[in-house]
Image (spheres, rainbow, N blue to C red):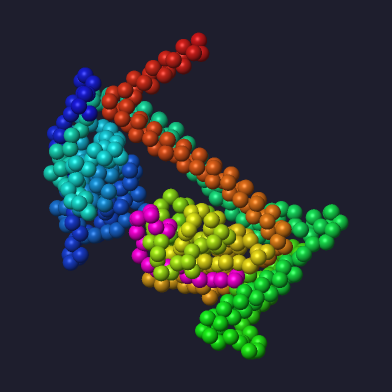
Amino acid sequence: MSHLPSGWKLLPLAEVAEVCLGKMLDKKRTSGVPMPYLRNINVRWGHIDRSDLLTMPFQAHELERFGLRHGDVLVCEGGEPGRAAVWTGDAKDLKFQKALHRVRLNGEVDPRWLVQQLFLDAHRGALSEHLTGTTIRHFTGESIKAYQVVVPPLDTQRAIVAAIEAHFSRLDAATATLERVQRNLERYRASVLKAAVEGRLVPTEAELAKKEGRSYEPASVLLRRVLAERRRRWEEAELAKLKAKGKPPTDDRWKSRYEEPAAPDTDGLPELPEGWCWASVDQLATEVCYGTSAKTGDDDAGVPVIRMGNIVNGALDLSELKFLPSNHDEFPSLLLEPGDLLFNRTNSAELVGKTAVYSGIPSPCSFASYLIRVRVAGGCRAEFLSAFINSAAGRRWIASVVTQQVGQANVNGSKLRACVLPLPPTSEQVRIVDAVDAAATVTRHLAGDVAAVRVRVARLRQSILKWAFEGRLVESSASMQVQRAAGSA
């Protein structure tokens, strides 16, 4: 702001205001008048939030010193130093704590103008040079008093502030619209998943078979085939282990060690579409295992490792990866195969259980210990299983089995194996997965567009403030009005 318009000044805040730091909380003192007070958490950008007020005792001589008047500016000393709002006097007898500066202007500066300058400087990084501390930053009394304020004539300040507020009001409306669009996209995604796992997203295989006059394989037959494949794979793996130990079996008694997965208890479960059946993850999976707990690094010459943060809205976000050396001793057993389902077993209560399917990219690729890999048998689509777990029904199941451990929610492998889900015929699974993918593609693109517009809105706010403090905002607004008038003539 070195090149100011004619008539504008640059003054330290101490020349145009009285600055006072709030009262320190003394928990030992109980005498005095209990009064509600504001903390830095109550001061948001541009407004005061009085929803969470505390009280502390004030002595008679402190009531005026730490009191507030209409037009006082409250500036955060810590927390988010510089965050500021104007006190409009909408509550009586409110005081303020040491984490806040009260800036009482002398009439040469409009309070709203000061808040807008602090907002501009904070968001473009110019305020940081006035702060002390490294990890915890502070806007000390000395620093805030030395803070340089741009001071145009008062009527100019008020005209510019009015223009800023008008522009920001329109941007607020645009932001609210974008937020509604985002919520609608989330509801649409949820409704697609709900329809998918209830057999309402695409025509069922039974319906198509009747319409086309043909037979089809119901899910109950598929499940019997899957269980047979599951047992066959176990027998092949067990026989290989016995031979590797030099103890090839002489009869079939070793096969009795196979544990058949229990059929799910379907009492109380809703009726399924024709051709569907209930199944457990244990019945459908040929493998359920935890990922690596080895420490990963940034050397991208190694094997990328999928972590829980890489699962976003039912898909894998590969923008930030960590790596393990290619010769890591858990490879190749913990390398992923296309179609492997990844289940986030530990996270916050809102995020635990988020699930996605590995498509084969990048390759090779592994997965971290907070994830569980589920490899399903032929005829089953892991993407359908993922859709179920990510659906409202899947979230209800997670909520019913989750455990809390030191602020983290957990769903272990045993509980995941016991998860009961609806199973459609194979060809119907394919159509459902394709429809879910198509809807997800649309929502991802729209969500990307919304995010891009929100970035532009944020940048436009900064541009408006920049123009304001360069003396160009009101002039630009006036020019636009002239142009519109000329265009309508």
Give x and y (percent) for residue 479: 39, 17
Identity of the residue drawn at 62% across and 79% down: 235
Give x and y (percent) for residue 375: 57, 66
296 to 469, vertically: above or below: below
Give x and y (percent) for residue 98: 20, 53
Q: Residue furthest top?
A: 489
Magenta residue check for 271: no
Q: Residue furthest front?
A: 246
250 to 265, vertically: above or below: below
**In the picture, which quadrant includes the N terminus?**
top left
Give x and y (percent) for residue 448: 50, 42
Out of 68 and 111, give the one closest to the viewer: 111
What residue range appears in magenta? 285-304
Identity of the residue drawn at 51% across and 84% down: 245
Q: Quadrant of residue 238?
A: bottom right
Q: Residue furthest right?
A: 213
Image check: 453 left or right of 89?
Answer: right
Identity of the residue drawn at 20% across and 65% down: 27
Q: Is residue 461 visible?
A: yes
Image check: 329 left or right of 337?
Answer: left
Out of 31 and 252, give the one closest to the viewer: 252
Identity of the residue drawn at 40% across and 66% down: 328
Instruction: Give the prevailing secondary structure in the magenta stretch.
Output: loop
73 to 395, vertically: above or below: above
38 to 14, vertically: above or below: below
Image check: 251 left or right of 209?
Answer: left
